[in-house]
Amino acid sequence: MRSDNSRHIVDAARQRSQYTRAKAIQALRTLEAAGEPITFETVAQQARVSRSWLYAQPDLRAEIEQLRAAHQRAPTSQVPARQRTSEASLLRRLQAAHERIRRLTQENEQLREHLARALGEQRATTTRTTPPPTHTADPETVTIRRP
């Protein structure tokens, strides 16, 4: 009678399944870290497994679908992450802009006051030297004479 070696076959299948699963998880992590689009096709190619196997694994399928949706929602930026503007830098630029606006507003007020004084002085000078007009004629009866 032959001995039952099915236990070895089952163990080999379990190891092969764990190895395949580890390859798929590693492919997911690699694609995610590289910022590559995550689809069933790209994960299958990276892990060297079939797409149908990925679809048959509920947890991997859910993670791929979640990462794929997150990648589609995220705006694609042509600037690498290390070259993007930091939050502190943006805050400093905003503060500088507010300071510039405050200075320009103050300067604008000073210029308006200066202009108002100059126009007031000009008006006062003009009214002192020029006698007020003495028109008593009715505007409808005024005739214009040509030289």
Image (cartoon, rainbow, N blue to C red):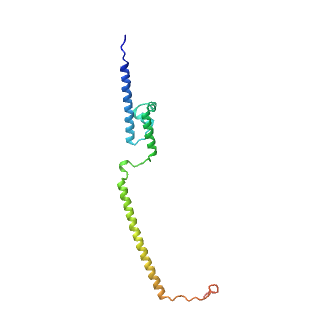
What number of labels is visible?
A: 0
- Left or right of 116: which side holds 12? left
Q: Could you say which is closer to the camera, residue 50 or residue 8?
A: 8
Q: Report the residue at 35% width, 56% height from top.
A: 89
Coordinates of residue 99 in the picture (x, y in percent): 37, 64
Q: Which of 31 and 22 is in front in this view?
A: 22
Image height of 138 relative to 73, above or below: below
Quarter of the rendering containing residue 67: top left
Spot the residue most to the top.
1
In the shown orientation, is residue 55 left or right of residue 96?
right
> Residue 114: x and y, percent?
41, 76
Q: Where is residue 125 in the image (x, y as percent from the top left)?
A: 45, 85
Identify which residue, 48 or 119, lies in the foreground.
Answer: 119
Image position of 106 with respect to 137: above or below: above
- Quarter holding the N terminus is top left
Quadrant occupied by the C terminus: bottom right
Residue at 36 percent of width and 20 percent of height: 7
Q: Residue at x 39, y 63 (%)?
A: 98
Q: Position of residue 14 (x, y in %)?
A: 37, 25
Residue 27 found in image quarter:
top left
Above or below — where is 92 with respect to 73? below
Residue at the far right: name it.
141
